Amino acid sequence: LTLTIPAGQRLSDALIMKMTTDNLPDLTKVYGIGFTIQSVSKAGVGIPSNLKNVLYKFTLKNKYDGRYTLNGYHNRDPYTFPYQTEIHLVTVGPDEVEFYWPLVSSVGHPIGIGAGNSMSWYGAAIAPVIVFDLDTDLVADVYNKPPNATPITMFTGPGSRLSKWDPATRNITVDWNYSNNDLRAFFDDLTYIGPRP
């Protein structure tokens, strides 16, 4: 591999890679590719020892991963106010994504506590993970991220909707609840914004 690295830039500025992920099946792992600069063609230019070796670290994302606008509400009084915020769905497996709320820089899920989109949350202890059926794109399960103890399940009680991913729009509908209680349900609509950085 021969590259031209413009003055003042680094290898990472000059190297653009395209790769297939067929041989990297585990979406829960972190992968890496290492490069070493062997020689420089321009006379009088050396290879700085701190820039000679470069390791690119990357993870894979499933098709549900991304940035979304979350619109929803909770049916537990007095927290029934609608909420709207940006949420990230982050790959944790080939068919699973977890809720990450950038506003609080943590996994977890918002809750409406007042008018005007006033929000709070239960903290990272309520961190739903959505599991999809890869063949149908229907939600197969929702659970709480370990080691959290509060049980979370897909909500199928009164007023529940079909929980699914729409491949045409990449939007998601998911209803879930905690503590196996029909009066602890969340009704979420996630509108796809784009990929996560």
Image (tube, rainbow, N blue to C red):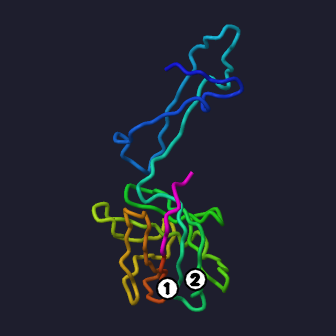
- In what element is the residue under mark 1? loop
Q: Quadrant of residue 93?
A: bottom left
Label 2 or label 1, whichever comes before in sequence order: 2
Pointer 2: residues within 10 angstroms few (<14), some, or many (20+)? many
User: Left or right of 137: which side holds 100?
Assistant: right
The residue that mark 2 highlights is: 82
Residues 149 and 197: in front is 197
Magenta stretch holds residue 5: no
Magenta stretch holds residue 191: yes
Image point (39%, 48%), residue name: 26
Query: How many marks on residues?
Result: 2
Q: Residue furthest top?
A: 43
The residue that mark 1 highlights is: 184
User: Left or right of 56: which side holds 137?
Assistant: left
Residues 14 and 120: in front is 14
Residue type, numbered disc 1? Arg
Residue type, numbered disc 2? Pro
User: Left or right of 88: which side holds 63?
Assistant: left
Majority secondary structure in the magenta region: strand
Q: Residue furthest front?
A: 168
Image point (61%, 76%), residue name: 121
The image shows residue 65 at horizontal and vertical percentages of 47, 58
Region rendered in magenta: 189-197
